[in-house]
Image (tube, helix red, strand yellow):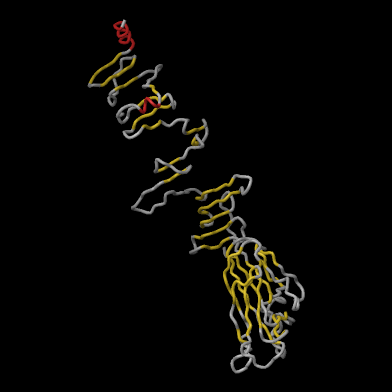
Amino acid sequence: MKTNSFLILILFLTCTVGFSQVAVNMDGTSADPSAILDVKSTSLGFLPPRMTTSQRNSIGSPAEGLTVYDNTLKNIFFHNGITWQEIQSERLWSRFVASSKTWLNNLNDSLGIGTINPSYRLHLWDNNLVNDKPIILLEQTGLGDASLGFYQNSAVGAGHYSIGLDRSHKAFKICDSAALTGNSYTNSKTMMTISRNYPGITHFNHQSRARAFLNGLPFTGPQTGQAIPWNTWYAVSFDFISWDEQNEYIPGIVPGPPIPPPVNPTSGKFITKEEGYYQINARTEFILWEIEQSYSPSYVSIAIFINGLPIAYGNKLNIFDLTGVQNTNNDAPVVCDVVHLIPGDVVEIYVFQNYSQPTGWILGADLTTAPPKVPGSATYVSIHKIS
């Protein structure tokens, strides 16, 4: 019976042996010169050894290139001399026919590039000690942007962000949108711009600015001003908003006549809408209602208050010099500082004078009482959101 089987095999298969090459076929053709074994058929396939994963792993000292079919994992494996490698299959990667989309099939898998032990969904590893090359390069040779997109797809906080090079504006940007957009200073979607044409950061958005005056614009006179109590820090009652560039503040400004002491003003407040660093500048000019006898320790000062507490103090100006002469040219205390604020913080400017009691100092009025009068409503505050 074994002899008959061997004869039948000879009848169906012609094996041409030459130069140690083997051709297995049904038409008698010779093996390809590049192949040690050339198997040819149009109706039959090649069947490699089939075994379980456990059996495959039990093969002792597998040769590099050894190939088997793992019927546990339903795929072909080959040994690369170090470990068994799985031939790519739909168990790992998937792709629709007539589709341009390929994806990692198992949602629990992690993809490693440069590492065999990825710790994240996508883990890129580099050990280049020669050149500080970027690990990822986004190259755009067309008319589009070279950018990355981020999307939070959840019930809370859903939204798009994008970051990258804006080709049309020649700038690196961070945008609150699905794609890079906007080049205007007031564009609400452009959060940060670094221009190629100018060094450093061109702007953060929203870089809002606001300014308010006491008793109208400066040098428009005449103004009656605001009386300031003696020996206490007291809020300036700004009552005229010059501008709020992007409407980013909630002003507590109540237009109208200044509120006289001892009632503390409720106007003159700026309430922030966004977190960030703010530069606050303030200046006040003053006159004296009455000239009293020399009181050398008397002075005026100015400060920035946040939520009712002092944050930064400005300069302290003596009202009289040491000889008892009034310092008529030293009448503008100023304060400037950068502070971190969060939404809802209240910004106010406070002033202090210990010249006389109960009142003897006034803000925003005409600086002189005799001709020529110098209108002096140069008591103001400006707030710049810088980040």
Instruction: Pinpoint residue 329: horizontal percent, then vertical percent.
Output: 62, 87
At 44% across and 49% down in the image, what residue appears?
137
- Is residue 220 shown above or below 132? below
- Name the residue at 67% across, 69% down: 243
Classify the position of the N terminus by image quarter: top left
- Say if 317 sits above or below 264 in the image: below
Residue lying at the far left in this picture: please name it: 19
Image coordinates for residue 73, horizontal then vertical, percent: 44, 27
Question: In the displayed structure, does residue 225 sit left or right of residue 329?
Answer: right
- Given residues 196 and 327, the one toward you in this image is 327
Position of residue 87 relative to residue 370, above or below, is above
Q: Which is more toward the observer, 289 or 59?
A: 59
Image position, residue 323 (x, y; %): 60, 94
Q: Is residue 26 left or right of residue 191?
A: left
Instruction: State which quadrant residue 186 falls in.
Output: bottom right
Q: Position of residue 79 (x, y in %)?
A: 34, 31
Q: Quadrant of the C terminus?
A: bottom right
* Residue appearing at x 58%, y 80% in the figure: 315
Residue 63 in which image quadrant = top left
